[in-house]
Amino acid sequence: MNEKIKKLKEIIDGTDNLVFFGGAGVSTESGIPDFRSTDGLYSQKYDFPPETIVSHTFFMKRNKDFFDFYKDKMMALDAKPNAAHYKLAEWEAQGKCRAVVTQNIDGLHQLAGSKNVLELHGSVHRNYCRNCGKGFDAAYILHSKGIPCCDSCGGQIKPDVVLYEEGLDQQTLEDAVYYISHADMLIIGGTSLAVYPAAGLIDYYRGHKLVLINKSTTPMDSRADLLIQAGLGEVFGQIG
Protein backbone atom coordinates (compact mmCIF):
# COMPACT_ATOMS: atom_id res chain seq x y z
CA MET A 1 0.00 0.00 0.00
CA ASN A 2 2.77 2.46 0.91
CA GLU A 3 4.45 1.91 -2.46
CA LYS A 4 1.20 2.54 -4.28
CA ILE A 5 0.56 5.73 -2.29
CA LYS A 6 4.09 6.87 -3.09
CA LYS A 7 3.56 6.20 -6.81
CA LEU A 8 0.21 8.01 -6.75
CA LYS A 9 1.83 11.05 -5.15
CA GLU A 10 4.59 11.06 -7.77
CA ILE A 11 2.06 11.02 -10.63
CA ILE A 12 0.00 13.81 -9.04
CA ASP A 13 3.11 15.92 -8.37
CA GLY A 14 3.99 15.62 -12.05
CA THR A 15 0.70 16.80 -13.53
CA ASP A 16 -1.29 20.00 -13.78
CA ASN A 17 -4.20 18.44 -15.65
CA LEU A 18 -5.95 15.76 -13.64
CA VAL A 19 -9.65 15.01 -13.69
CA PHE A 20 -11.43 13.12 -10.93
CA PHE A 21 -14.41 10.85 -11.63
CA GLY A 22 -16.23 9.72 -8.48
CA GLY A 23 -19.23 7.83 -7.20
CA ALA A 24 -21.00 7.03 -3.93
CA GLY A 25 -17.83 5.70 -2.28
CA VAL A 26 -16.50 9.27 -2.13
CA SER A 27 -19.25 10.17 0.34
CA THR A 28 -19.65 6.97 2.37
CA GLU A 29 -16.88 8.19 4.69
CA SER A 30 -19.08 11.25 5.29
CA GLY A 31 -21.83 8.92 6.50
CA ILE A 32 -23.92 8.85 3.31
CA PRO A 33 -24.92 5.28 2.37
CA ASP A 34 -24.19 4.04 -1.12
CA PHE A 35 -26.53 1.85 -3.13
CA ARG A 36 -24.69 -1.34 -3.98
CA SER A 37 -22.48 -2.39 -1.04
CA THR A 38 -23.65 -5.01 1.48
CA ASP A 39 -25.05 -2.31 3.78
CA GLY A 40 -26.14 0.00 0.96
CA LEU A 41 -29.66 1.10 0.15
CA TYR A 42 -30.27 -1.77 -2.27
CA SER A 43 -29.69 -4.26 0.56
CA GLN A 44 -32.26 -2.65 2.85
CA LYS A 45 -35.93 -3.56 2.98
CA TYR A 46 -38.65 -1.17 1.90
CA ASP A 47 -42.19 -1.62 0.59
CA PHE A 48 -40.68 -1.09 -2.86
CA PRO A 49 -37.11 -1.63 -4.13
CA PRO A 50 -35.07 1.61 -3.92
CA GLU A 51 -34.39 1.57 -7.66
CA THR A 52 -38.17 1.54 -8.19
CA ILE A 53 -38.76 4.39 -5.74
CA VAL A 54 -36.19 6.63 -7.42
CA SER A 55 -37.70 6.18 -10.87
CA HIS A 56 -39.59 8.80 -12.86
CA THR A 57 -42.68 6.60 -13.02
CA PHE A 58 -42.78 6.16 -9.24
CA PHE A 59 -42.23 9.89 -8.67
CA MET A 60 -45.22 10.68 -10.88
CA LYS A 61 -47.54 7.97 -9.56
CA ARG A 62 -46.66 7.75 -5.86
CA ASN A 63 -45.31 11.20 -5.08
CA LYS A 64 -45.71 11.00 -1.29
CA ASP A 65 -43.98 7.61 -1.05
CA PHE A 66 -41.16 8.99 -3.21
CA PHE A 67 -40.61 11.99 -0.93
CA ASP A 68 -40.84 9.88 2.24
CA PHE A 69 -37.89 7.82 0.97
CA TYR A 70 -36.08 10.76 -0.60
CA LYS A 71 -36.13 12.88 2.56
CA ASP A 72 -35.22 9.94 4.78
CA LYS A 73 -32.43 8.37 2.73
CA MET A 74 -31.14 10.68 0.04
CA MET A 75 -30.84 14.22 1.39
CA ALA A 76 -28.22 13.87 4.17
CA LEU A 77 -28.01 17.62 4.74
CA ASP A 78 -25.96 17.23 7.94
CA ALA A 79 -23.13 15.37 6.17
CA LYS A 80 -19.72 17.05 6.09
CA PRO A 81 -16.95 16.72 3.47
CA ASN A 82 -14.20 14.19 4.20
CA ALA A 83 -10.48 14.04 3.36
CA ALA A 84 -11.16 13.12 -0.27
CA HIS A 85 -13.40 16.14 -0.89
CA TYR A 86 -10.93 18.52 0.72
CA LYS A 87 -7.93 17.10 -1.12
CA LEU A 88 -9.65 17.53 -4.50
CA ALA A 89 -10.53 21.15 -3.64
CA GLU A 90 -6.90 21.70 -2.61
CA TRP A 91 -5.63 20.30 -5.93
CA GLU A 92 -8.01 22.55 -7.84
CA ALA A 93 -6.74 25.60 -5.92
CA GLN A 94 -3.19 24.54 -6.83
CA GLY A 95 -4.12 24.37 -10.52
CA LYS A 96 -3.78 20.57 -10.69
CA CYS A 97 -7.39 19.39 -10.77
CA ARG A 98 -9.29 20.74 -13.77
CA ALA A 99 -12.67 19.17 -12.99
CA VAL A 100 -14.53 16.87 -10.63
CA VAL A 101 -17.06 14.67 -12.42
CA THR A 102 -19.40 13.16 -9.84
CA GLN A 103 -22.32 10.78 -9.77
CA ASN A 104 -23.23 12.06 -6.30
CA ILE A 105 -26.06 14.48 -5.56
CA ASP A 106 -24.96 15.61 -2.08
CA GLY A 107 -23.07 18.81 -2.92
CA LEU A 108 -20.13 17.91 -0.66
CA HIS A 109 -17.50 18.70 -3.29
CA GLN A 110 -18.72 22.29 -3.45
CA LEU A 111 -18.96 22.46 0.34
CA ALA A 112 -15.30 21.45 0.52
CA GLY A 113 -14.36 24.25 -1.88
CA SER A 114 -14.29 22.68 -5.36
CA LYS A 115 -15.56 25.08 -8.01
CA ASN A 116 -15.67 23.12 -11.28
CA VAL A 117 -17.96 20.23 -10.30
CA LEU A 118 -19.92 18.42 -13.01
CA GLU A 119 -22.90 16.74 -11.36
CA LEU A 120 -23.99 13.97 -13.71
CA HIS A 121 -27.01 13.03 -11.60
CA GLY A 122 -28.00 16.50 -10.36
CA SER A 123 -28.15 17.81 -6.81
CA VAL A 124 -30.48 17.69 -3.81
CA HIS A 125 -29.74 21.39 -3.34
CA ARG A 126 -31.65 22.38 -6.48
CA ASN A 127 -35.40 21.84 -6.71
CA TYR A 128 -37.93 23.44 -8.98
CA CYS A 129 -41.66 23.75 -9.49
CA ARG A 130 -42.74 21.73 -12.53
CA ASN A 131 -45.50 24.27 -13.17
CA CYS A 132 -43.93 27.75 -12.84
CA GLY A 133 -40.23 26.87 -12.60
CA LYS A 134 -39.58 28.57 -9.24
CA GLY A 135 -36.50 27.21 -7.48
CA PHE A 136 -36.28 25.91 -3.92
CA ASP A 137 -33.40 24.89 -1.69
CA ALA A 138 -32.99 21.54 0.05
CA ALA A 139 -34.21 22.86 3.42
CA TYR A 140 -37.58 23.77 1.88
CA ILE A 141 -38.01 20.19 0.69
CA LEU A 142 -36.82 18.60 3.93
CA HIS A 143 -39.07 20.66 6.19
CA SER A 144 -42.18 20.52 4.04
CA LYS A 145 -45.07 18.45 5.34
CA GLY A 146 -45.88 15.49 3.12
CA ILE A 147 -45.54 16.39 -0.57
CA PRO A 148 -43.56 19.61 -1.18
CA CYS A 149 -45.60 22.10 -3.19
CA CYS A 150 -44.69 25.45 -4.71
CA ASP A 151 -45.46 28.37 -2.37
CA SER A 152 -46.25 30.56 -5.39
CA CYS A 153 -48.55 28.47 -7.57
CA GLY A 154 -49.11 25.26 -5.61
CA GLY A 155 -47.47 23.18 -8.34
CA GLN A 156 -45.56 19.94 -7.90
CA ILE A 157 -41.89 20.35 -6.92
CA LYS A 158 -39.27 18.03 -8.37
CA PRO A 159 -35.70 17.67 -7.10
CA ASP A 160 -33.11 18.43 -9.79
CA VAL A 161 -31.80 14.87 -9.62
CA VAL A 162 -31.73 12.37 -12.47
CA LEU A 163 -34.18 9.57 -11.69
CA TYR A 164 -34.22 6.18 -13.35
CA GLU A 165 -35.87 6.45 -16.80
CA GLU A 166 -34.61 10.03 -17.16
CA GLY A 167 -31.75 11.18 -19.36
CA LEU A 168 -28.64 12.96 -18.14
CA ASP A 169 -28.24 16.68 -18.80
CA GLN A 170 -26.65 16.97 -22.24
CA GLN A 171 -24.43 19.96 -21.45
CA THR A 172 -23.06 18.32 -18.31
CA LEU A 173 -22.32 15.17 -20.31
CA GLU A 174 -20.54 17.13 -23.03
CA ASP A 175 -18.46 19.04 -20.46
CA ALA A 176 -17.50 15.77 -18.74
CA VAL A 177 -16.44 14.24 -22.07
CA TYR A 178 -14.34 17.32 -22.83
CA TYR A 179 -12.45 17.29 -19.53
CA ILE A 180 -11.93 13.53 -19.45
CA SER A 181 -10.77 13.34 -23.07
CA HIS A 182 -8.28 16.19 -22.53
CA ALA A 183 -6.99 15.00 -19.14
CA ASP A 184 -3.37 14.04 -18.60
CA MET A 185 -4.35 12.00 -15.53
CA LEU A 186 -7.70 10.46 -14.63
CA ILE A 187 -8.46 9.33 -11.09
CA ILE A 188 -11.56 7.16 -10.69
CA GLY A 189 -12.65 6.76 -7.09
CA GLY A 190 -15.46 5.31 -5.03
CA THR A 191 -17.52 3.89 -7.87
CA SER A 192 -18.37 0.37 -9.00
CA LEU A 193 -18.58 1.69 -12.58
CA ALA A 194 -21.88 -0.15 -12.92
CA VAL A 195 -24.19 2.79 -13.72
CA TYR A 196 -24.46 3.80 -17.37
CA PRO A 197 -24.23 6.12 -19.21
CA ALA A 198 -22.01 7.69 -16.53
CA ALA A 199 -19.54 4.78 -16.40
CA GLY A 200 -19.16 4.91 -20.17
CA LEU A 201 -17.47 8.31 -19.87
CA ILE A 202 -14.26 6.53 -18.86
CA ASP A 203 -13.87 5.34 -22.45
CA TYR A 204 -13.10 8.91 -23.52
CA TYR A 205 -9.85 8.99 -21.55
CA ARG A 206 -6.85 8.78 -23.89
CA GLY A 207 -3.94 9.10 -21.45
CA HIS A 208 -1.70 6.63 -19.67
CA LYS A 209 -2.18 7.72 -16.06
CA LEU A 210 -5.42 5.99 -15.16
CA VAL A 211 -5.70 5.56 -11.40
CA LEU A 212 -8.54 3.48 -9.94
CA ILE A 213 -9.25 3.67 -6.20
CA ASN A 214 -12.14 1.58 -4.91
CA LYS A 215 -12.72 -0.88 -2.07
CA SER A 216 -14.23 -3.55 -4.33
CA THR A 217 -13.34 -4.76 -7.81
CA THR A 218 -14.69 -2.99 -10.88
CA PRO A 219 -14.97 -3.94 -14.59
CA MET A 220 -12.17 -1.45 -15.31
CA ASP A 221 -9.52 -2.83 -12.91
CA SER A 222 -7.44 -4.41 -15.68
CA ARG A 223 -7.25 -1.08 -17.54
CA ALA A 224 -5.83 0.86 -14.60
CA ASP A 225 -2.20 1.96 -14.64
CA LEU A 226 -2.41 2.12 -10.84
CA LEU A 227 -5.02 0.15 -8.87
CA ILE A 228 -5.56 0.81 -5.16
CA GLN A 229 -8.25 -1.21 -3.40
CA ALA A 230 -8.98 0.95 -0.37
CA GLY A 231 -11.24 3.74 0.82
CA LEU A 232 -10.75 7.04 -0.97
CA GLY A 233 -10.49 9.17 2.16
CA GLU A 234 -7.94 6.76 3.58
CA VAL A 235 -5.81 7.03 0.43
CA PHE A 236 -6.10 10.79 -0.08
CA GLY A 237 -5.46 11.38 3.60
CA GLN A 238 -1.99 9.86 3.19
CA ILE A 239 -0.99 12.16 0.34
CA GLY A 240 0.86 15.22 1.62
Image (spheres, rainbow, N blue to C red):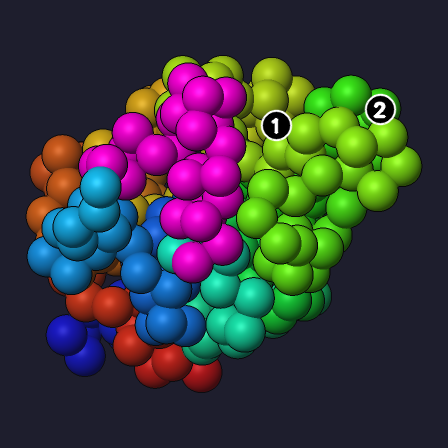
* Amino acid on which the number 2 mark rests in the picture: Cys
State which quadrant residue 122 falls in: top right
Q: Percent x, y for residue 19?
A: 50, 46
Q: Is residue 186 visible?
A: yes
Q: Residue at 43% of width from left, 29% of height from top?
A: 62
Q: Residue at 39% of width from left, 56% of height from top?
A: 73
Q: How many marks?
A: 2
Left/right placement of residue 122 relative to residue 240 reads right
Magenta residues (range): 48-72
**Disc 2 designates what residue?**
132
Q: Percent x, y for residue 207?
A: 38, 34
State which quadrant residue 28 falls in: bottom left
* Amino acid on which the number 1 mark rests in the picture: Thr
Left/right placement of residue 157 relative to residue 72 reads right
Is residue 70 found inside the magenta-colored segment of the image?
yes
What is the number of the mark on residue 161?
none
Gap in angstroms between the C-alphas marked 1 and 2: 24 Å
- Answer few, some or many: residues within 10 Å of disc 2's Cα (few below 14, many 20 plus, some between 14 and 19): some
Q: Are marks 1 and 2 in contact (CB under 8 Å)?
A: no
